[in-house]
Image: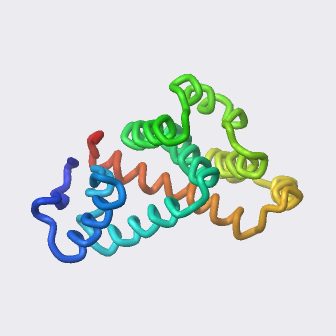
């Protein structure tokens, strides 16, 4: 539900219906946030492909991505994404409300492996103040065996969350 007339399961047709059916099969529901994308079928397909790519990652990498989504939403005050990512972290990764509160203040306490924690801190720094990223940050990541492609992808993913947050806030996507 939003300010736009997005498709529902009942009225979806064509490509939108195909994507919705696949989402329903994999997730058991079509979240309101994904329904918003149905106003542009091509964008819906691309967004669903991004979600599927994330869901195909190893659990530790999925956890990292959900933490980034949660913190990006918090920084952008996107209530829908804060709630959704928070629920996923609690349900799928054993987080508590206290842990969520703690990582908002200090992301470095997130329960992640060393490599993922470094990527998290880098991603959050990039969306908080990209001008502060320097050669030392890159060298630190390389010393941990993180490739330039991984660095690029984590910043791309974190910054895409701002796009998603802006869409959801602009069009007033309601919680599921």
Q: Residue furthest left?
A: 11
Q: Is residue 21 left or right of residue 144?
A: left
Please, is residue 113 above or below residue 16 in the view? above
Please, is residue 127 above or below residue 57 in the view? above
Which corner quadrant holds the C terminus? Answer: top left
Q: Is residue 137 left or right of residue 106?
A: right
Q: Residue furthest top?
A: 98
Residue 34 percent across, percent down from the top left: 32, 57
Residue 12 percent across, percent down from the top left: 15, 66
- Residue at 71%, 62% in the rendered image: 151
- Residue at 17%, 59% in the rendered image: 9
Residue 105 percent across, percent down from the top left: 63, 28
- Residue at 71%, 33% in the rendered image: 109
Image mark count: 0
Residue 65 percent across, percent down from the top left: 57, 52
Q: Is residue 14 left or right of residue 72?
A: left
Q: Quadrant of residue 6?
A: bottom left
- Residue at 71%, 50% in the rendered image: 116
13 or 104: nearer the eye? 13
Please, is residue 58 above or below residue 81 in the view? below
Colour scheme employed for the rendering of this structure: rainbow
């Amino acid at each position: 539900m939003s300010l736009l007339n997005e498709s529902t399961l009942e009225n979806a047709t064509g490509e939108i219906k195909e994507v919705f059916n696949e989402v329903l099969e994999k997730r058991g529901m079509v979240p309101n946030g994904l329904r918003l994308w149905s106003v542009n079928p091509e964008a819906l397909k691309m967004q669903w492909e991004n979600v599927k790519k994330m869901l195909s990652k190893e659990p530790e990498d999925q956890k990292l991505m959900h933490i980034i989504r949660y913190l990006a939403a918090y920084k952008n005050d996107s209530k829908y994404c804060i709630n959704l990512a928070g629920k996923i972290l609690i349900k799928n990764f054993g987080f508590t409300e206290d842990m969520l509160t703690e990582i908002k203040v200090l992301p470095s306490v997130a329960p992640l492996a060393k490599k993922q924690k470094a990527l998290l801190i880098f991603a959050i720094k990039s969306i908080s103040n990209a001008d502060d990223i320097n050669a030392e940050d890159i060298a630190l990541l390389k010393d941990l065996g993180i490739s330039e492609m991984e660095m690029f992808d984590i910043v791309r993913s974190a910054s895409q969350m701002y796009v998603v947050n802006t869409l959801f806030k602009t069009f007033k996507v309601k919680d599921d």
